[in-house]
Image (cartoon, rainbow, N blue to C red):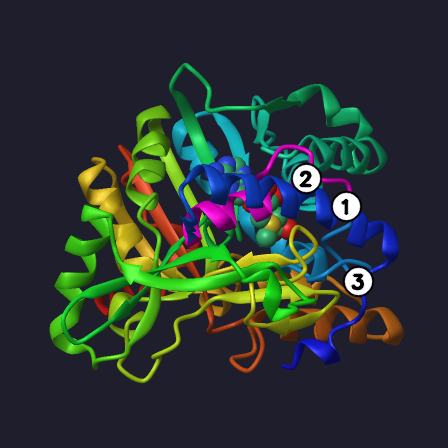
Amino acid sequence: MHNSSLPQPHPDAVAHSQHLINTITQAIFDAGGAISFAEFMAQALYAPGLGYYSAGVRKLGAKGDFITAPEISPLFSHCVARQCQQVLAALNDGVILEFGAGSGIMAAEILMELERLDSLPLQYLILEVSADLQQRQRETLQAQVPQLLNRVQWLKSLPSHKLSGVILANEVLDAMPVQRFCLDEQQISEFYVGLANPDNNHTETPFVWQALPTRDKSLQAAVEALRPALPIGYVSEINLALPAWIQSVADILATGLVLLIDYGFPSGEYYHPQRDQGTLMCHYQHYAHDNPLILIGLQDITAHVNFTAVAEAALVAGLHVSGYTTQANFLLNSGLPELLSAFDPDDTKNYLQQTQQAKTLILPSEMGELFKVMALTRHLDIPLLGFARDERARL
Ligand SMILES: C[S@@+](CC[C@H](N)C(=O)[O-])C[C@H]1O[C@@H](n2cnc3c(N)ncnc32)[C@H](O)[C@@H]1O
């Protein structure tokens, strides 16, 4: 996609973006001329009050930049609720903790479905780094499930005590900062972000890529391990913060399930020789493109998830990898057909709308295959509902 074919931001958005550009420029000066891409991505998405997820612009839904599964259809959240119900019943109670709850619609629909099933969790905790999204979540829950708001509690960081129950993260891992690398003949280069020469008359962005020998020993070691299978010039990215995140989640789970839903692949597919430009994607007003150095703070930046790396980190953290499957399989086994059959086919308009939305969630050409669901457990020995068609052998 050429940048010229992207929608032009409103002058207010341009002014907002300039504040973040100034902050990142200062960070680049402070670092001696370049920062890692992971640091750039962290600032672009999460700089307090300025980053894409920290500032007050509508991101999710038809009027935002992208649509996630819970925004497409309540059926998605109702299936997740059924998986939660099975685990909460096996644990004889427990809580739900959701990471990065977006608009709050998944939380509202899960609570609604669990109330209907008479299986409400003791508490629904939401860990949300963005104050703006926290406010939006509160409004959604107030409007949808006011009677259950007293069960919902927002956290700014992980709870200090261990919990039993279900930990949920839908499209959270893809929003974590990654490092970008290139395999050169002699060395592993890392893509840093520096400042364009002002004489170059750059109008779209003051930032440029700088490929330099990496200074990061962990990146060096991780990419050396991948090198034998990959061609010279290969570019991709890696989330080196993932193991610490999984460890911190494992540390607070006494008993129960961590359910991770996201787009991604096993390592062999992620680092496939033909996927030689990586998986970085940006979303701006429903346009997808691959340049994270423009529209600073105004666009989402994502990378696909390496589910083999997630599983390996989970094992190190003492969790059991209990299931891995496609979103389609997960939803079909968590009750999607029964939920759909409850709609009246004679109410044609609604019925068609529901089936159309369900198709978006499960068709291979839509979200069904690219999105995966992974179950990590501790002291939970039950055959999980959504993983009857398990694909762990692919990891
Ligand atoms: C693509 S949005 C997904 C929102 C929502 N889960 C949905 O499916 O609609 C990514 C979310 O992850 C959150 N996030 C990213 N890293 C996080 C972290 N380390 N802890 C908690 N939330 C995080 C962001 O603030 C944002 O709310």
Compared across the picture, whether 14 is left or right of 212 comes to right
Compared across the picture, whether 71 is left or right of 161 comes to right
Q: CA distance from mark 1 to mark 2?
A: 7 Å
Q: Is ligand 1 closer than 8 angstroms to the Cβ of mark 2?
A: no
Q: Amino acid at mark 2?
A: Leu
Q: Position of residue 25 (x, y in %)?
A: 56, 45
Q: Secondary structure at mark 2?
A: loop
Quadrant of the rendering where the N terminus is positioned = bottom right
Dividing the image into four quarters, tell me where ligand 1 lies.
top right
Q: Secondary structure at mark 3?
A: loop
Q: CA distance from mark 2 to mark 3?
A: 22 Å
Q: Position of residue 245 (x, y in %)?
A: 36, 37
Compared across the picture, whether 22 is left or right of 352 comes to left
Q: Is residue 311 magenta?
A: no
Q: Amino acid at mark 3?
A: Ala
Residue in the foreground of this view, choosing between 41 and 341: 41
The residue singled out by tag 3 in the image is: 62
Q: Position of residue 392 (x, y in %)?
A: 26, 62
- Circle 2 or circle 3, nearest the eye: 2
- Circle 1 or circle 3, nearest the eye: 1
- CB atoms of marks 2 and 3 within 8 Å: no
Q: Amino acid at mark 1?
A: His
Q: What range of the chain is rendered magenta? A: 37-57
The residue singled out by tag 2 in the image is: 50
- CB atoms of marks 1 and 2 within 8 Å: yes
Label 1 environment density (alpha carbons within 10 Å; few <14, some 14–19, many ≥20): some
Q: Which mark is residue 16?
A: 1
Quadrant of the rendering where the C terminus is positioned = bottom left
Q: Secondary structure at mark 1?
A: helix
